[in-house]
Amino acid sequence: MLNYTIYRHAQAKKWVTFVHGAGGSSAIWYKQVREFRKHFNVLLLDLRGHGDSKTHLRDAFADKYTFDSITDDIVEVIDHEKIEKSHFIGISLGTILIRNLAEKHKHRVDKMVMGGAILKLNFRSQVLMRLGVIFKSLVPYLWLYKFFAFVIMPNKNHKESRSLFVREAKKLYQKEFIRWFKLTSEINPLLRFFRGADIKIPTLYVMGSEDYLFLPSIEKVAKSHRFSELFVVPECGHVVNVEQPTVFNTQVLEYLGVRPS
């Protein structure tokens, strides 16, 4: 089972589950935990191969990595903790996992918050993926990861996000990076389906105005999906919860029906 941390609230019944992206860990939510645990029960996950869900669990995750199998890891945890329903908050690739979970287990999802959401790979990101396929077994994965992080988060004000993700990615192994990278082979059909299907679960997209790779597609989806809303954070890149935590926390808490303290 995945490594996870729970903060229980003395009175609150509702849960919030945080899902990080590829190369990160539950540590990326350090600017959210204090605020959210004032109002909710909080569940923080380390996805397979990330954070503390790594060495001792490698044999348990020896099967082929798919979005369904990684989604099932999350469901296993909420089942184990008898969490019947939760709000889900994700960042980057974590938003794909949340949406996939909602497709498979709609009754388990209250509201979805998608930070730095990925719903389409534009030409630049497609080229990035192809380069990764070519070089993933030839060069140290951290070189590739640093390159990807710079392309996705290029500006000076994105430096903290880049540094955080690279620091967390150092905890991965080369084989683990390759396993995750192979997920790109199934990503386009999945994202195409997500863009075309309004799942009818209240969804807030929180995107940075400088998230050049992914914002344009989210703008289109937010307009066409009846249950979706978009909030764009000015002067902010891909990892909105790290770069603009006060704005992120305020908008998300209000969307989830509580007044930030």
Image: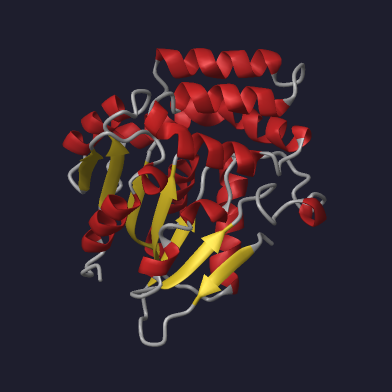
Q: Locate residue 143, reporting x and y percent.
A: 67, 23
Residue placed furthest toward the bottom: 10
Q: Quadrant of residue 192?
A: top left
Which residue is at a point 71% across and 30% down the rendered structure image?
A: 178
Residue 256 in sight here:
yes
Quadrant for the C terminus in the image: bottom left
Tell me if 163 is positioned left or right of 195 in this view. Answer: right
- Front in this rendered view, residue 62 or 142: 142
- Front in this rendered view, residue 118 or 165: 165
Q: Locate residue 253, reporting x and y percent.
A: 27, 62
Tell me if 119 is positioned left or right of 253 in this view. Answer: right
Which residue is at a point 37% across and 80% down the rendered structure image?
A: 13
Residue 201 in sight here:
no
Which residue is at a point 38% across and 26% down the rendered structure image?
A: 120
Quadrant for the N terminus in the image: bottom right
Q: Is residue 148 above or below residue 230?
A: above
- Front in this rendered view, residue 166 or 4: 166
Residue placed furthest toward the front: 156
Q: Is residue 227 above or below residue 111?
A: above
Which residue is at a point 31% across and 57% down the rendered structure image?
A: 249
